[in-house]
Amino acid sequence: MAHSEIDAIRALLGSKPRPVGWSERRQRINEVGSTWPVASDVTCEAVDCDGVAGEWSIVPGSEPSRVLLYFHGGGYCSGSIVSHRRMVTEAGRAAGTRTVAIDYRLAPEHPYPAAHEDALTAWYFLRRQGIAAKNIAVGGDSAGGNLTLGLISRLRAAGEPLPACAWLVSPWTDLTMSGSTLATKDAVDPLIHKVYLDELADAYAPPSIDRRDPLISPLFADLKAFPPILIQVGSAETLLADAARLAEAAGAADVDVTLQIWPHMIHAWPVWNAGLQDGRRALAYAGQFIQAHLR
């Protein structure tokens, strides 16, 4: 079943090839990400996070005092609350928490560090709501995983309490694009290729910026004292090496890190959890991980 289901997702993506313009790309990711609607028992509510757009979600039985703060993927240039709503709301269900998804500013209109500034604003918004850091999990896929790690680095540098844990799906951790699987997985990845990543990186962090900066490429960050991290990545991803090398770096820094490599799965596959059993299984495991670390 797993093969037939992921083949159906591949067919969906192939039926809506990536266009050229930024506006058209953003529309496309919203369309393919929202193929399946949010479940009927989910309550969503727009929220102004001190000037940054966000959306609360909760399902019956979830604990509102515990929060999953989520940053969507899209290479810092696309993606939104809409494209990731089904994934975020079902992650909240699995974790038994309320969620807040963030529509951070996108490049090229708003290059680095705009998204980081918005992530910090969203974090401090939650803290001002009286939510303790130990009751917040932070997560993201692709560029959102990058942004999650950047937020934790900034909080640590400021001497602030850190979130209880971090959940990363298909994280983009190396904007120097040195990962070996960019070449070895190119033929099987239907979404992410080096030429595309180069374009995204140029839009987000222009060539004048050192892309080995740990806030640009968290693979090169000092991860010491980071909270527990769950990394989930598919075996059919060009970003597989980004995830694996991050896990190695985190482990070397004595961070409690779990790396899961899901056979045959593609970039950010839990987005399509409604039609993909492995997407639901990945969210269930992430939910258990978050529950285990929120106090």
Image (cartoon, rainbow, N blue to C red):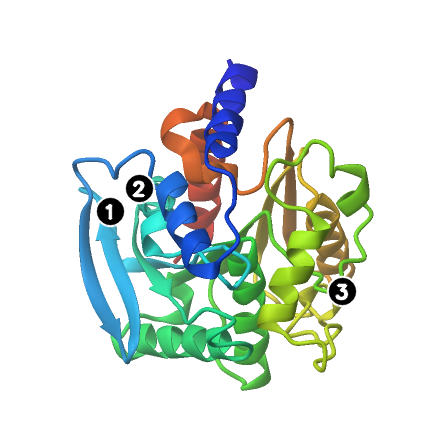
Amino acid, disc 1 = Ser
| CA–CA distance in space, label 1 to label 3 | 40 Å
Amino acid, disc 3 = Thr
Residue at the outermost front position: 20
Image point 42% across, 42% down: which residue?
A: 287
Residue under label 2: 93
Residue 250, label in figure: none
Image point 47% across, 77% down: which residue?
A: 110
Q: Determine whether, in the image, residue 30 is placed left or right of residue 222.
A: left
**Image-quadrant location for residue 211:** bottom right
Please, what secondary structure does the residue beneath circle 3 have?
loop
Say whether disc 1 or disc 3 marks the residue closer to the N-terminus. 1
Look at the numbered discs 2 and 1 and tell me whether their residues touch, using CB distance below 8 Å. Answer: yes
Image point 29% across, 69% down: which residue?
A: 53
Residue at the outermost bottom position: 158
Q: Nearer the viewer's eye, disc 2 or disc 1?
A: 2
Residue 176, label in figure: 3
Look at the numbered discs 1 and 3 and tell me whether their residues touch, using CB distance below 8 Å. Answer: no
Q: Determine whether, in the image, residue 194 is placed left or right of residue 293.
A: right
Q: Determine whether, in the image, residue 257 is placed left or right of residue 152.
A: right
Location of the C terminus by quadrant is bottom left
Residue under label 1: 62
Image point 19% across, 52% down: which residue?
A: 44
In the image shown, does 7 or 135 lie closer to the viewer? 7
Say whether disc 2 or disc 3 marks the residue closer to the N-terminus. 2
Query: What is the crowding at mark 3: few (fewer than 14 residues within 10 Å), some, or many (at least 20)?
Result: some
| CA–CA distance in space, label 2 to label 1 | 7 Å
